[in-house]
Image: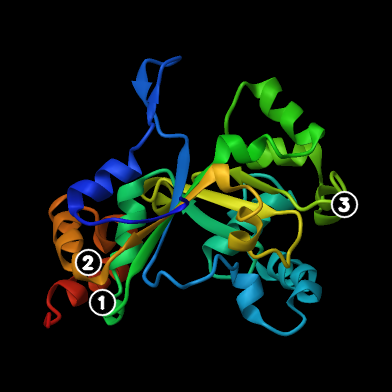
């Protein structure tokens, strides 16, 4: 069963860290990346898809104009993949999707919205190592050359310099790649950030995952557990103040902490 409904805080920990022992490393290292959502029925749609309209035709124009008007010193290298990462970070609709290595940070995003405490939340978990076995040869060769499990933007650039080149690496089949963004600010670092990117800008990730049931889990957090999980995360210092450094994050944290709880 890919969909698991947890029954307690301890059951949630058990499911999140299941099969994390790595005998080769002799360490507990989960092979999954995580994404938390405050509503269990939310789809895994990118901000580009949620833009609506003929969004797939707008992708190039959005990024082109972002690059044109942005300060040139906001990226390490002048590649489309660096620019795409920065654009996503600053709210531009893109085909990227936010993930995290940390199941606790995913739990934060599943429980931070007080307006959604009347519905179940969810943490999606995807085995990115297994997902990368589905990549085209040129991309898998980049991983093998580096001896890595995750991509960097430079590794993607070595294989493809544009969206078109990226999609044409496997023209007849959709694929999804997971990569670590450059540490351009504290948010990426504190959130243990990870991104996914698909070869098809129209791809809805949960629909794609159904073709590969062995690589994912959908962990349902019952609405009755949200308050307990939220309190325990706050005591563990997993909150807006830490994940969004600055006055905005501080204000969001204080607003939530001092809001009445029914």
Q: Residue at x 58, y 61 (%)?
A: 206
Q: Position of residue 240 (x, y in %)?
A: 28, 63
Can residue 158 be seen in the rendering of this structure?
yes
Q: Secondary structure at mark 2?
A: helix
**Which mark, residue 157?**
none
Q: Position of residue 228 (x, y in %)?
A: 14, 62
Question: Do the CB atoms of the residues marked 2 and 1 lie less than 8 Å apart?
Answer: yes
Find residue 198 and report its image quarter: bottom right
Decide which of tag 2 and tag 1 comes sooner along the chain: 1
Quadrant location, the C terminus? bottom left
Q: Secondary structure at mark 3?
A: loop
Q: Is 16 placed left or right of 144 in the picture?
A: left
- Residue holding disc 3: 172
- Residue holding disc 2: 226
Q: Position of residue 223 (x, y in %)?
A: 25, 71
Can residue 180 be seen in the rendering of this structure?
no
Q: Is residue 161 above or below residue 240?
A: above
Decide which of tag 2 and tag 3 comes sooner along the chain: 3
Q: How far, Cα to Cα, is label 3 from label 1?
A: 42 Å
Q: Is residue 211 above or below residue 149?
A: below
Q: Position of residue 42 (x, y in %)?
A: 48, 72
Question: Do the CB atoms of the residues marked 2 and 3 lie less than 8 Å apart?
Answer: no
Q: How far, Cα to Cα, is label 2 from label 1?
A: 7 Å
- Residue holding disc 1: 117
Q: Residue at x 72, y 72 (%)?
A: 62
Q: Is residue 146 above or below residue 231?
A: above
Q: Residue at x 67, y 28 (%)?
A: 143
Q: How far, Cα to Cα, is label 2 from label 3?
A: 42 Å
Question: Do the CB atoms of the residues marked 3 and 1 lie less than 8 Å apart?
Answer: no
């Amino acid at each position: 069963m890919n969909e698991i409904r947890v029954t307690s805080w301890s059951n949630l920990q058990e499911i999140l860290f299941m099969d994390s022992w790595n005998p080769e490393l002799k360490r507990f290292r989960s092979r999954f990346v995580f994404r938390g959502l405050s509503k269990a029925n939310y789809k895994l749609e990118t901000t580009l898809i949620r833009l609506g309209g003929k969004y797939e035709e707008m992708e190039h124009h959005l990024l082109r104009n972002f690059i044109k008007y942005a300060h040139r010193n906001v990226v390490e290298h002048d590649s489309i993949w660096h620019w795409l990462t920065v654009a996503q970070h600053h709210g531009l609709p893109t085909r990227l999707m936010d993930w995290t290595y940390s199941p606790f940070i995913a739990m934060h995003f599943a429980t931070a919205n007080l307006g959604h405490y009347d519905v179940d939340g969810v943490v999606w978990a995807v085995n990115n190592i297994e997902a990368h076995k589905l990549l085209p040869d040129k991309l898998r060769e980049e991983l093998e050359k580096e001896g890595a499990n995750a991509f960097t933007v430079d590794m993607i650039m070595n294989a493809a310099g544009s969206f078109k080149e990226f999609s044409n690496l496997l023209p007849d089949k959709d694929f999804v790649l997971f990569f670590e963004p450059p540490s351009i600010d504290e948010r990426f670092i504190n959130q243990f950030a990870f991104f996914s990117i698909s070869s098809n800008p129209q791809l809805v990730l949960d629909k794609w995952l159904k073709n590969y049931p062995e690589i994912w889990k959908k962990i349902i957090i019952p609405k009755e557990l949200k308050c307990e999980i939220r309190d325990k995360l706050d005591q563990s210092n997993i909150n807006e103040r830490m994940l969004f450094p600055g006055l905005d994050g501080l204000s969001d944290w204080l607003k939530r902490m001092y809001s009445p709880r029914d």
